[in-house]
Each structure stands twice: as structure tokens, then as C-alpha cells.
Amino acid sequence: MAQENIVKVKSFDFAVKTVKLAYLIQKEKKEFDLTRQIIRSSTSISANLEESMGGQSEKYFLHKVSISYKEARETEYWLRLMLAVGLITKEQ
């Protein structure tokens, strides 16, 4: 049996949780600008990792993984900002 790719699984789960959080904020707080940003960046992490696994070269793979890393850093920024302005709590 093939071993499951933990990075692939965790990045997808993170995207799902982040999208659900964003939808909750949109519904409860009617905030759409920051939530659109976090949906875009958080889903891009796993999308680029997924695409990297189908790459035809090591250079392409590394390029897509690098993009995923940058998107993860951006997502972390949006989460910090949302926390700082009171849209989310640390528990969320």
C-alpha cells in the first residue's frame, strides 16, 4: 500500500479549515475583503503542491513548492492581521 503524502493531506485540510473560517466571518461579520484574500492564499498552498507533484522536471517541482511556501507566508500574514483587528480569536 502506498504511503499517503502528509504534506498534501495537511495542506488540503488547512485550506478546508481556512475557507470554513472565512465563510463564518463573512456570514457573522460581513467582512469580505480580508476573507477573499485568505481564501485565495490558503487554497493556493495545496493547489500548487498538488500541481508540483505532476511536474515534469525537478525545476518545475521546486518552482511550485516555492510558490506554496510564499502563499503559506501570505496566509500567515492575513491570519495575524485578522487577529489584530479582532475578526478572529487565537482559538479560531
Image (cartoon, rainbow, N blue to C red):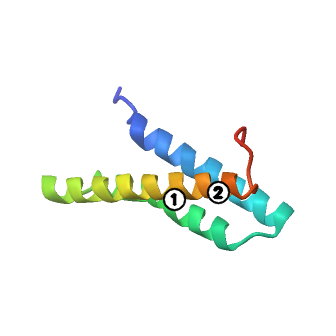
Above or below 56: residue 31: below
Q: Kindly indicate the quadrant of the structure image that contains residue 6.
A: top left
Q: Amino acid at mark 1?
A: Thr
The residue to which callout 1 is attached is: 43
Can the viewer see residue 34? Answer: yes
Residue 39 versus residue 53: which sits nearer the camera? Answer: 39
Q: Secondary structure at mark 2?
A: helix
* Mark 1 or mark 2, earlier in chain: 2
Residue at (40, 39) in percent of width and height = 7
Q: Kindly indicate the quadrant of the structure image that contains residue 35.
A: bottom right
x, y (%) of residue 27? Answer: 83, 64
- Sort mark 2 into few (<14), some (14-19) or many (20+) by Cα contacts within 10 Å: some
Residue 85 versus residue 28: which sits nearer the camera? Answer: 85
> Where's the N terminus, which quadrant?
top left
Dot 1 and dot 2 residues touching (CB under 8 Å): yes
Q: Kindly indicate the quadrant of the structure image that contains residue 13.
A: top right
Residue 92 versus residue 85: which sits nearer the camera? Answer: 85
Residue at (81, 70) in percent of width and height = 30
77 to the left or right of 68: right
Above or below 2: residue 14: below
Residue 8 versus residue 14: which sits nearer the camera? Answer: 14
> Where's the C terminus, which quadrant?
top right
Q: Which mark is residue 19?
A: 2
x, y (%) of residue 77? Answer: 52, 56
- Sort mark 1 into few (<14), some (14-19) or many (20+) by Cα contacts within 10 Å: many
9 to the left or right of 5: right
Q: Secondary structure at mark 1?
A: helix
Residue at (66, 73) in percent of width and height = 33
